[in-house]
Each structure stands twice: as C-alpha cells, then as structure tokens.
Image: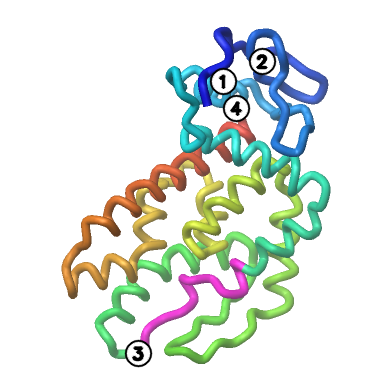
Amino acid sequence: MKRFYKAVAVEAAEGGWQVFLDGRGIKSVGGRPQIVPTRALADALAAEWNRQGEEIDPAGFVLRDMADFAIDVIGPDRPGAIAALLRFGEGDTLLYRAEAGEPLHRRQVERWEPLINAAEARWDIHFERMEGIIARPQPAATLARLRAVLDAEGDFTLSAVNTVASLAASLTVALAALQPGADAVDLWALANLEEDWQAEQWGKDDEAEARRTRRLATFTAAVEFARMARTG
C-alpha cells in the first residue's frame, strides 16, 4: 500500500491520547478510536507511522497491533482475555524440566529457579514443577492469585503481557517483565534456554537465528509497550 498521509500528530482525546494522520484520528482494526492511556505510548505509535516510507510495511506496526488487541479483544472481554493468559501459567515452560540428573535439568534449575522463586515470594504462591513428560495441575490458590494479579492491570498492559507470554510460552516471564528494572534480553534468554541448549549440542541454524532475532525485537517492544502503558 502506498503511503497515504503526510502529517502525523498526537492529540489529547477523551480517556487518553490518539494519533492523527493529516488531522484524522486513527482507529483500531475493529473500527474503534485508537485511544491509548499515556502520551508516551501515543508518541511511540506516532513514531511507527513516521518511520514508514513510500510503501506501508505492515510489519512495522508492532505497537499498533498491541494497542488494537487491547482495544478490540481485551476491552470487550477482559475475563476471557485473562482466562487465556492463565493458560500460560498452567503450562508455563519454566515449570517443565528434563529428568533429574540430566545436564539440561541442572541448567534449568540454575537459571529458572531464581525467577520462579521470586514470583512465589512476590505473590505468596506455590508452583508445581514437573520433570519429564508427566504434567500436574497448578494449585487452585495459585491460579486464583495470578488471576487477581492480572485483573489489577489495565487492558494495554495485559495486551503486552499477552505478547510476551505468547513468545515465551511463560506467564512468569511475562509478569517478570512488568517489574521495575526488568531486563528484556535476559528474560528472553530464560524463555529460550532449551532452544539455546539444543544449539549448543547440534550447532546454530541461520534461519532459526533470524527468526529468533525477529521474535526478540517483538518481545522487547512488548516489554517497552507495557512500561509506557503503565507509567507514560
């Protein structure tokens, strides 16, 4: 698609801030006004539009997609969105370990336990760890507490959590990304520990590395999206 606008601006709107293209307010994919909660987030969305060249590249709208998800998916059905996020907690990658005694298991414990322990202490919960292929349900009290943690966040933060959790296959990683001083690159490394382990054993694949780089960029953008949505 050819670029169809010249001027990009950010203006205050009822309930937040909105990006305008040649004086017309942006709408979400679902046709709702794309109003975001902070000026910082609106400025970042405007920057995506400003970076476009003569041809519009849809891949350049990572933040816009998360904003639209907050407006069109989470807003109309918060309980459903939170239930979907809880599934990343029930099957959290960081809770599934190799068999005890295996080298991979030792690395998983070394790298993953500090983050899991911190989450348990932060919310006074307990996670069931699993070894091998046998799954066990997470305690009902743990899931109830995580539901309350998610419900305390705004729609736009939940949208970022959804992106991070989807990429990491981990709710604990996604919620850790909301903590002050969170290091997106380190969290990404935790989420990709098993992939990195396989690469160490068998060598790296160029195509897989390129895909990982793209996914890391989206992961990092989502962490920043959450920061801007919460604090401006």
Q: Which mark is drawn over residue 25?
A: none
Alpha carbons under labels 2 and 1: distance apart: 8 Å
Alpha carbons under labels 3 and 2: distance apart: 56 Å
Q: What residue appears at the point 71 percent right and 33 percent down from the top-left corner? A: 28
Given the image, on which type of amino acid does mark 1 rest? Ala
**Position above or below: 60 against 93:** above
Alpha carbons under labels 2 and 4: distance apart: 14 Å
Q: Which mark is drawn over residue 46?
A: 1
Residue at label 3? Answer: 100
Front-most of residues 121 and 43: 43
Residue 28 belongs to magenta span: no
Helix, strand or loop under label 4: helix
**Looking at the image, do the residues carrying marks 1 and 4 touch, with CB atoms under 8 Å apart?**
no
Q: In this view, does 72 lie to the left or right of 129?
A: right
Q: What residue appears at the point 61 percent right and 41 percent down from the top-left corner? A: 66
Task: Tell me where residue 35 appears, x and y as whole percent.
Answer: 73, 27
Sequence-wise first label, 1 or 3: 1
Residue at label 2? Answer: 20
**Looking at this rendering, what residue extends furthest in the front direction?**
1
Task: Tell me where residue 122 appears, x and y as whole percent.
Answer: 59, 60
Task: Tell me where residue 18 appears, x and y as whole percent.
Answer: 70, 20
Q: Is residue 119 left or right of residue 81?
A: left
Residue at label 4? Answer: 41
**Looking at the image, do the residues carrying marks 1 and 3 touch, with CB atoms under 8 Å apart?**
no
Q: Residues within 10 Å of mark 4 (few under 14, many from 20)?
A: many
Residue 98 belongs to magenta span: yes
Sequence-wise first label, 2 or 4: 2
Q: Is residue 52 left or right of residue 156?
A: left
Write down the quadrant of residue 190 in the picture. bottom left
Helix, strand or loop under label 3: loop
Given the image, on which type of amino acid does mark 4 rest? Leu
Question: In the rendered structure, which segment of residues is drawn in magenta?
Answer: 88-100
